[in-house]
Amino acid sequence: MSSGTPSADIRVVHRAGRTAAIQAAAALALVLLIVGGVGFAVDVRMQNRQIDTQLVTVATTADDVTDPPPGTILAMRGADGGVSASTHADGVTELLSGPAGFTELQIDGRDHRAYVVDTARGRVAAVMDLEPYRTSRKRLLASLGIAELAGILASVAVVAMLTRRSIRPLAQALALQRRFVADASHELRAPLTVLHTRAQLLARRPDVRDTPDLAAQVAALMSDTHALGEVVEDLLASAAMSEGAMPRERIDLAALATRVTTDFAGLADAAGVTLQAEIPSSTWPIEILGSATAVRRAVAALVDNAVSHGHPGGRVTVR
């Protein structure tokens, strides 16, 4: 395996780390958004309460309309029916003829809030311009947006850094595991080749060929060493190959299962277990795509597990 090319599982780990970083950053962004929204809502509520309190105070304490607080308009109707106002803006004096309480209106295209109350001096209307408060809210909203963006960027950077540090040991462990598999496969290849060659030479001896049982056992030994060599080659290939480069060949699953059942017949007989394959010939071939060595190893593991855990007189059937 090339040291400069990350393996498939290491790329998966890095991809999972990036996904976790994005999810964590999104969660932090959502928290910041909720906190900012709650803070903005609280600020708006407090401003509205402040406006209402100020309007009530101005309206109930006003003696005349000559000197209203900044940003406030006063209108009064005395007991004699005389109407006066601190400005001649349209709609202000009409408030004195409407119901008491709070109301909203527009003066010169700007939003205002008014409070009308009956006092001992007559009816009083206090009107406040909401534009400064709206401007303040916009500045607060812009500040919250900038803080939200900065928080998201900072959280993404921090989470990405922490995630990278946390997955680094796992990536190193996977790299060491692949290196160990590759080294072990190289070390096993030579003695397996020698063992298979000796089995072939033994099968060619006249005394072995003339003894059917011994010839069958030697043939089974050759088949087993060949299968073990395929497993080693498959491990070596999997340690060196990247994702997407794994072999994809057509495999007759029925034939493969039948062959595995035949290979394990001796082990089953020794354990006193009846091992048989029930695969109707009408279903052949059953073709799949994949690695023949890997599929054979998987089927062999299943059969071996079933035979090993079977009891004498039991039966294992491959369907």
Image (cartoon, rainbow, N blue to C red):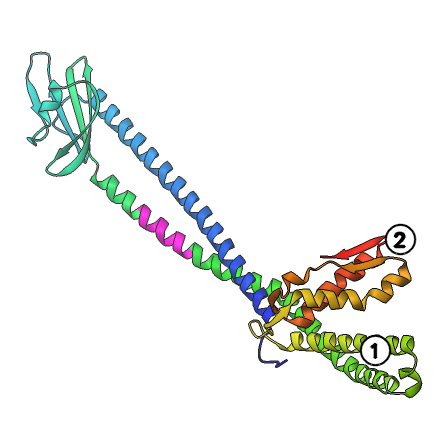
The quadrant holding residue 93 is top left
Number of numbered discs overlaid on the protein picture = 2
Mark 2: few/some/many CA within 10 Å (<14, 14-19, 20+) = few
Q: Give the residue number, with chain letter if any, for mark 2.
A: 313
Left or right of 293 on screen, residue 158: left
- For the residues marked 1 and 2, what is the alpha-carbon distance in whole angstroms? 27 Å
Q: Amino acid at mark 1?
A: Ala
**Which region shows up in magenta?**
140-150
Give whichever of discs 1 and 2 has the lower sequence position: 1
Q: Nearer the viewer, residue 113 or 34?
A: 34
The quadrant holding residue 293 is bottom right
Mark 1: few/some/many CA within 10 Å (<14, 14-19, 20+) = some
**What is the number of the mark on residue 128?**
none
**Residue 134 belongs to magenta span:** no
Q: Quarter holding the N terminus?
A: bottom right
* x 29%, y 32%: residue: 48
Q: Nearer the viewer, residue 36 or 291?
A: 291
* x 77%, y 75%: residue: 228
The rendered magenta stretch, by its main secondary structure, is classed as helix
Q: Give the residue number, with chain letter if any, for mark 1.
A: 219
Q: Amino acid at mark 2?
A: Gly
Q: Is residue 88 above or below residue 187?
A: above
Q: Position of residue 190 (x, y in %)?
A: 79, 85
Quick check: marks 1 and 2 in contact, CB under 8 Å? no
Q: Position of residue 298 (x, y in %)?
A: 71, 64
Left or right of 21 on screen, residue 281: right
Q: Position of residue 8 (x, y in %)?
A: 59, 71
Q: Nearer the viewer, residue 216 or 2?
A: 216
